[in-house]
Amino acid sequence: MTTPKIAFVGAGSTVFAKNLLGDILSFPELGGADIRLFDINQERLDVTEQVAHRVARTVGASPRVIATTDRDRALDGADFVINMIQVGGYQPATVTDFEVPKAYGLRQTIADTLGIGGIMRALRTVPVLADMSRDMERLCPDTLHLNYVNPMAMNIWGLARLTPRVKTVGLCHSVQHTAEELAKDLGIPVEEIDYLCAGINHMAFYLKFEHRGQSLYPRLMELAESGQVPEWNRVRYEMLRRLGSFVTESSEHFSEYVPYFIKRGRDDLLEKFNVPLDEYPRRCVSQIGGWEDLRTKLQNPDEPLEVTRSVEYGSLIIHSMVTGQPRVVYGNVMNSPLDGSAGKLIANLPDECSVEVPCLVDRQGIQPTRIGRIPPQLAGLMQTNINVQALTVEAIVTGNREHIFHAAMLDPHTSAELDLDQIWALTNDLLNQHGDFIPETLQAAD
């Protein structure tokens, strides 16, 4: 593979695409790559195409770049497919996921991974990803699908059930970002820290966090006990105090994966732990504004385009598979193959679930690491989220809409704020509001 063919699906996510393009084209071995940019929004696609050419000039690369609204053209013969779509977009889907629950008294922070918002996002996303994967089976069966789309665990699990022939790895930046945050809290350069992390996406924990062979957990625990922690990280430091391990995903995310921090009648908890309700809609509005700013800068030839390497794993995987240079990245894969051909990566999590573990990558592709057993309290907490993921995936795969309600009923945060009648009514209302974004067999009853 001398000239890799790389398809960007959802390339209208211009800022994210820019970062990945900069990462990829900064490698001399990838500078001549065949880049295919695909999106259904022509205006956004045009902006990303301009970005791609400017990034290439900035880093001195000479890729072949095409932009197309024809998905088949983008996928045809692709060695790598990078997926960054958002089904339903901010308007109407994300707004619906926040505003309808709010009317029932259910408050959320991000709503894209678990909870009622995560369930709805999975219902509208997994079928689209599966349809795309069937196209990959036809047009690029040997591709590696790099999925950046949430809800990560449910997407990976659903694709494993529906289109197992396509090799897929889910990529997130929570592991490496959190390592940087903790290093900053401790005043240690992150490159001097050794860590091992495992679990499920957005609920993986550092099993080892060391500096020069010494565990840093005593120092982290001292910070947690002192209360002198960054105000945006109070939730995670509190969980460190209770569980003995630090979780990878941000406090605003994690606060809605558990029943402890957002509870009806306990707004004092929101203040104590600095829980930012409605954070994701604010973030979306900011990102939309960022896209407008980027478009304006692109139209000004005198405005320099800054290209710096991000912490995303995508370019590292592509570079390692093209050159053979071995690396370790963190990827989301199934805990064990559905055909039973190998044992579990994390021994005390279910056979059939998606896990986030370190993976060796070289010319042979993604090779996950077998972790063994993790601390039982961590496995138990993860299981509360896996229950919701399992039932949501089961609903999508079988078309049994009752499992959507079961998933919502078992969700830790939803059940902390609503009773059963409210959960059933809210779920049906959301299915009705999302309409054709939801597969026909799962849509709201008349």
Image: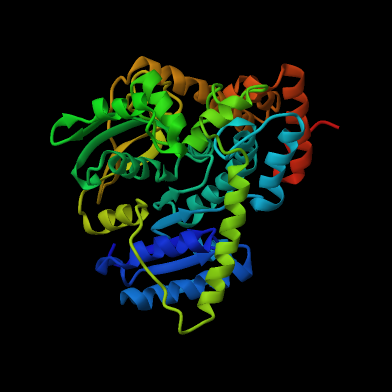
Residue 140 versus residue 147 in the image, above or below: below
x, y percentage for residue 32?
A: 32, 72
Which residue is drawn at the image coordinates 23% and 31% (left, top)?
Answer: 216
Which residue is drawn at the image coordinates 37% and 25% (left, top)?
Answer: 240
Q: How many marks?
A: 0
x, y percentage for residue 52?
A: 44, 72
Seen as rendered, the residue at the extreme left is 212
Q: Nearer the viewer, residue 129 or 233?
A: 233
Q: Nearer the viewer, residue 313 or 203?
A: 203
Which residue is drawn at the image coordinates 45% and 37% (left, top)?
Answer: 231
x, y percentage for residue 141?
A: 43, 51
Residue 25 versus residue 150 in the image, above or below: below
Left or right, 238 with respect to 359, comes to right
Seen as rendered, the residue at the extreme bottom is 302
Q: Nearer the viewer, residue 179 or 84?
A: 179
Q: Quadrant of the N terminus?
A: bottom left
x, y percentage for residue 70?
A: 58, 65
Q: Does residue 178 show up?
A: yes
Which residue is drawn at the image coordinates 42% and 76% (left, top)?
Answer: 54
Residue 144 versus residue 117 in the image, above or below: below
Q: Quadrant of the C terminus?
A: top right
**Which quarter of the picture shows residue 439?**
top right
